[in-house]
Amino acid sequence: MTYLNLRRSMAAAAGLAALAAFVNVALATNSWGGYHWARTTPQFTLKLGNNLSAGWQQHLSDASSDWNSPTVFGAASTPLLTAIVAGQSNKRCSMVAGTTQVCNSTYGNNGWLGLASINITGGVHITQGSAKMNDTYFNTSTYNNVNEKRHVMCQEIAHTFGLDHQSTDGSSQNTCMDYFSNTGANATKTASTRPNLHDFDELNIIYGHLDSTTTVAQTTSLSSNADVDANDDPNSWGKLVSQSNNGRSSTYERYNNDGSKTVSHVYWSLEAAAKCPSCDHRYDGGH
Ligand SMILES: [Zn+2]
Ligand SMILES: [Zn+2]
């Protein structure tokens, strides 16, 4: 090899290495559209309003405790702490400014297991969130187990932190931000029921800057803003903007009269997804 050719191949190798590093960074990202709570301090506490019935309380407290314990998962710190407070909502889970309201109910045979919605102002700032678990499915033998409930609870509340999925193909990345199904033969497996290191790395990236204002509630006396709400009625979710290949994960967006946007992540049941993976499951009927 001539010196010039050597230089060229070294440059090409360096270019490939840089590209590989870039691809790794891109793959490592599970931010939900850059959405984040505005805040003026490096660490903040998000209030999780507990509107849950008795059977779900432990799953919320386990999830909250996991998200508050970065060192358990190998991370040095987390910018986002959670605090469970008395629920300020109702079964429909109307949002309350500055908080995430967490709810469960028998929302019906509408195909979804879990639903997380956030309201966005200024393009990126989360102003309020809600996370709902559908007992119409969780009361059935397929889904009624500790691991599946813990998986979905952990994921739905974390969407309201600004986290997206790490994977939607059904494989376990051993994070609750994937679509491994803790059902059937996997009902006793604890894989994917808790966060992993990568989720905390991502939170530290998402919250690596400070904002000049805050959208996080400092008190619990704020009121709900029903005008920008996305509730359990699928018609309130807006337009389908993306869906995973297997049909289990969909994102919807709605633009509101006040200029804000409401974005929802829908976690579809196995049955709804299998029926027609590429359909908008709101309209493929008869779940
Ligand atoms: Zn910001
Ligand atoms: Zn999800």
Image: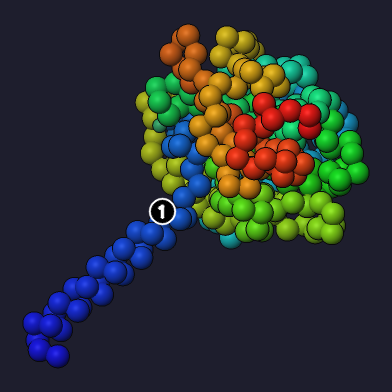
Find the residue positioned furthest to the bottom: 1
Vertical arrangement, residue 276 with respect to residue 219, above or below: below
Q: Is residue 242 above or below residue 205?
A: above
Quadrant in which the N terminus appears: bottom left
Q: Position of residue 68 (x, y in %)?
A: 64, 44
**Direction from residue 242 to residue 19 in the image, left or right:** left
Q: Residue at 44% of width from left, 21% of height from top? A: 121
What residue sits right under mark 1 in the picture? 26
Query: How far from the left and from the top, in percent, is residue 198?
Result: 54, 55
Q: Image quadrant of residue 207?
A: top left
- State the residue in front, 60 or 267: 267
> Where residue 24 sits: x, y (%)?
42, 60
Q: Tell whether 122 sits left or right of 157.
A: left
Q: Nearer the viewer, residue 239 or 224?
A: 239
For the question of whether residue 253 can be seen, the reply is yes
Secondary structure beneath disc 1?
A: helix
Which residue lies at the image location 12% right of the left edge and 83% below the top edge? Answer: 5
Residue 6 picture quarter: bottom left
Q: How far across and how far down the image is residue 144, in percent?
A: 87, 43
User: Which residue is depicted at the point 73% across and 58% down?
Assistant: 191
Q: Residues within 10 Å of mark 1 (few under 14, many from 20)?
A: few
Residue 252 appears in which quarter of the rendering? top right
Inspect the image, locate mark 1, and give the three-letter code of the amino acid beneath it.
Answer: Ala
Residue that appears at 60% across and 40% down:
278
Q: Quadrant of the C terminus?
A: top right
Label 1 CB sits under 8 Å from any ligand 2 atom = no
